[in-house]
C-alpha cells in the first residue's frame, strides 16, 4: 500500500514541479543561465520536499527530525505559491493578475526558502547523533583536563616539594654526566705532529762524492760509531 501512495505523490510532485519550473523560467532571463537556475530552484520546492521527507524518516535525533519536517512543509509552501502563480499567469479562460500580496510573497519568499534550505542542511548535519556524541566526548575531556590543571596549579607548592628530590637527582645526574663526558674526551690522545724519530726520511740525490745527504729536519738513521 505504501508504494501506491509514494507513486501517487511522485505523479503529483511531477505536475507541481513542472508548474514551478514554468513559473521560474518566465521570471528569469530567457537564456541558459535562467534555465539552469529554474531547475536548481526545484531543490528548494518539489525535490527538496521529497528529500527532506525521506530524511525525516531516517533521522537519528529529535533535532534532526524537527529540522527535516519543518523544511518539508517549507518547501511544500514554496511549491504551492509558485504553482498558484504559474496557473494565474497561464490562465487562458480569463485574464487574471497575480495579487500583489502573492507577488511580494514570491519575490521575498522564494529566495528565503532557498536560504533556509541551505541553513537547514547545515543544522541537520551538525545535529547528527554521531556528531553530537563526538562533541560531548570532546567537551567532557576538555572539562576534566581543565579541572585537573586547575588542581595542579592550586597545589603546585606541595607538588614541587614532593618532586624536589627527583628533580635534584636528575639535575645532578645531568651535570655529572656532562662533566664525565668532557673528562673522557680530554683524556683521548689528540693528533700530534710526528716526532723526529717518526718523521719519514727524505733522501736527496747522491752528491758527487757518493755521500747521501739528509734533510735538516731528519736525523741521520745510520748508527753512530
Image (spheres, helix red, strand yellow):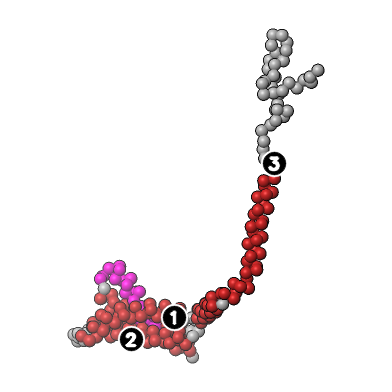
Helix, strand or loop at label 3? It is loop
Mark found first going from the N terminus, 1 or 3: 1
Q: Which residues are magenta?
A: 29-49
- Work out whether mark 1 precedes mark 2 in sequence or the reverse, and give the earlier one: 2
SS assignment for the magenta stretch, majority? helix
Residue 202 picture location, percent across and down: 69, 22
Up the image or down, 178 lies above or below 190; here it is below
Asked whether residue 137 is in view, the answer is no
The residue under label 1 is 124
Tell me if residue 70 is in the magenta stretch. Answer: no
Calculate the distance from the C-alpha at mark 1 to the C-alpha at mark 2: 20 Å
- Residue placed under numbered mark 3 in the picture: 189
Task: Determine whether the residue tagged by mark 1 lies in a helix, strand or loop.
Answer: helix
Seen from the viewer's position, the closer of residues 174 and 106 is 174
Percent from the top left, x then y, of residue 19? 31, 81
- Measured in 3D between alpha carbons, the distance from the residue under mark 3 to the one under mark 2, in whole angstroms, is 94 Å
Give the side of residue 93 with respect to residue 19, left or right.
left
- Relative image position of residue 164 (x, y in whole percent): 62, 69
In this orientation, which residue lies closer to the viewer: 79 or 147?
147
Horizontal side, residue 163 vs residue 135: left or right: right
Neighbourhood count class around disc 3 (C-alpha, 10 Å): few under 14, some 14–19, many 20 upward: few
Of badges 1 and 2, nearer the viewer stands 1
Q: Residue at x 69, y 41 (%)?
A: 189
**In terms of depth relative to the viewer, which is nearer, 216 or 99?**
216
Location of mark 2 (residue): 77
Q: Name the element at disc 2.
A: helix
Identity of the residue drawn at 29% across and 77% down: 24
- Of mark 3 and mark 2, the one earlier in the sequence is 2
Is residue 28 visible to us here?
Answer: yes
Amino acid at each position: 500500500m505504501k508504494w501506491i501512495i509514494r507513486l501517487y505523490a511522485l505523479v503529483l510532485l511531477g505536475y507541481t514541479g513542472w508548474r514551478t519550473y514554468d513559473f521560474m523560467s518566465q521570471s528569469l532571463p530567457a537564456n541558459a543561465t535562467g534555465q539552469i537556475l529554474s531547475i536548481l530552484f526545484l531543490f528548494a520546492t518539489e525535490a527538496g520536499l521529497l528529500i527532506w521527507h525521506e530524511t525525516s524518516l531516517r533521522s537519528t535525533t529529535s533535532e534532526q527530525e524537527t529540522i527535516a519536517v519543518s523544511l518539508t512543509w517549507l518547501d511544500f509552501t514554496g511549491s504551492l505559491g509558485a504553482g498558484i502563480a504559474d496557473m494565474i499567469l497561464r490562465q487562458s479562460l480569463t485574464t487574471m493578475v497575480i495579487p500583489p500580496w502573492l507577488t511580494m510573497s514570491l519575490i521575498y519568499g522564494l529566495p528565503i526558502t532557498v536560504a533556509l534550505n541551505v541553513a537547514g542542511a547545515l543544522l541537520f548535519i551538525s545535529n547528527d547523533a554521531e556528531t553530537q556524541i563526538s562533541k560531548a566526548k570532546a567537551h567532557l575531556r576538555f572539562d576534566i583536563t581543565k579541572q585537573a590543571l586547575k588542581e595542579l596549579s592550586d597545589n603546585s607548592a606541595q607538588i614541587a616539594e614532593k618532586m624536589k628530590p627527583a628533580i635534584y637527582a636528575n639535575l645532578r645526574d645531568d651535570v655529572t654526566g656532562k662533566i664525565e663526558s668532557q673528562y673522557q674526551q680530554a683524556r683521548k690522545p689528540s693528533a700530534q705532529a710526528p716526532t723526529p724519530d717518526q718523521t719519514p726520511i727524505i733522501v736527496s740525490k747522491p752528491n758527487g762524492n757518493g755521500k747521501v745527504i739528509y734533510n735538516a729536519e731528519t736525523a741521520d738513521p745510520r748508527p753512530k760509531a
